[in-house]
Amino acid sequence: MWQCSDKVQDHFLNPRNVGVLEQADAEGQAGTIAFGDALKIAIKVDPDSGVITDARFKSFGCGVSIAAASALTEIVIGKTIDDASAVSDADIVDYLGGLPDDKMYCAVLGQEALQTAIAHYRGQNGADDSETICKCFPARKAFLERIIRANKLTLPGQVTNYTKVSGGCQSCKKPIEALLAEVNADMVEEGILAAADAYQAPVKASHFMPAKFQMNGNGAPAKPNGVTEANGKSIGPGIARPNAAPTSGQEAQPTPQGMAAFAKLNQEERIEVVSKAIDELRPHLKADGGDCELVEVKENTAYVRLTGACMGCQMASVTLSGVQQRLIEKTGMPLRVVPVQ
């Protein structure tokens, strides 16, 4: 928070237009408390001119989320409904003098709440009934396509920064990569994105492809002394991969092969495999001020300790579920994740 601009800190410490708006003409909401950030915005509109004369917000989220909502109300008060409908998340970011990369979703949250309020005012049904892509941070396909296009996103990490998707169990990682590649390809065809900048989905290793040509998600060859995982990465020399079930947006399921392979690992190797899987999730948790560390592995149970913002968070159960799904995906074992103090 303290690495943000002075304007962001000012809007966090002295939020404008916060609270309930009596006799509001329309309300809009984005996010959920379970999602970790939720925002409700209410507007009052002059019926003759169509100008927004007042706006209020209520927020459940981080300091940057509060600052973004505060800025949004200042941006839209005095604008007509038509002009306000054109306000983008980039406008909120510019107004605040920029946001950290991993906090861009705060501006998106504000823009989505505003659009919902405007749809409410116009009597429109703004419901998004497209396919759900991410279950941890509920996000639908149409929403993700809109954010990718509006901000010209070309990397999966950018999509996570703007929407939080793939920041939990990561079972949606492959569908998001496929969607990003699809939308970028359309943008190239429409002439709004250079072909060299477009995202290319990782090449899936073929059974007939020589190992030296098998690539991971970053385009790097698999290590020669380690067994290649489904995503192309090596879990380390000398440690056999326990044949985890591949993911395709569905919840990972234990497999007989995974359980048999995991059973052959000694205790040190089991800890290494589980620890590696958890380490892949930690950067996403740290981005929100939390963390998760492995304490112990006993039989089919991984004991972990949540720290930082994850302690006492209402999303702790979602975080633990995401860690558990990640471990099942990586090991093929029906591992349980149990938090300890």
Image: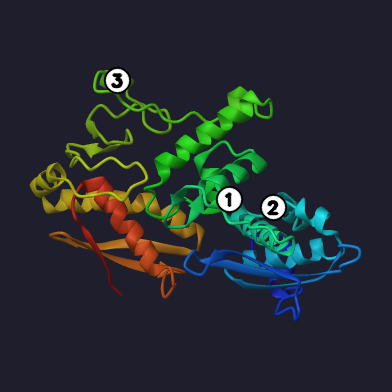
Q: Nearer the viewer, mark 1 or mark 3?
A: 1
Q: Quadrant of the N terminus?
A: bottom right
Q: Is residue 171 visible?
A: yes
Q: Amino acid at mark 1?
A: Tyr
Q: Callout 1 environment at 10 Å: few (<14), some (14 to 19), or many (20+)?
A: many
Real-space Cα separation, disc 1 to disc 3, in angstroms: 35 Å
Image disc number at residue 212: 3
Q: Can you give x and y, in whole percent of width and height, for residue 57 in the image?
A: 69, 72
Q: Callout 2 environment at 10 Å: few (<14), some (14 to 19), or many (20+)?
A: many
Residue at left offset 28%, top offset 40% = 246
What residue does disc 1 label?
A: 162
Q: Secondary structure at mark 2?
A: helix
Q: Can you give x and y, in whole percent of width and height, for residue 183 in the image?
A: 56, 34
Residue at left offset 53%, top offset 38% = 155
Q: Amino acid at mark 3?
A: Lys
Task: Indicate the quadrant where residue 83 lies.
Answer: bottom right
Residue at left offset 76%, top offset 66% = 73
Task: Indicate the quadrant where residue 193 lies.
Answer: top right
Circles 1 and 3 in contact, beta carbons < 8 Å: no
Q: Secondary structure at mark 1?
A: helix
Q: Amino acid at mark 2?
A: Asp
Circles 1 and 2 in contact, beta carbons < 8 Å: yes
Check the image and tell me how it is coloured: rainbow
Q: Is residue 216 left or right of residue 100?
A: left
Q: Is residue 62 visible?
A: no
What residue does disc 2 label?
A: 89
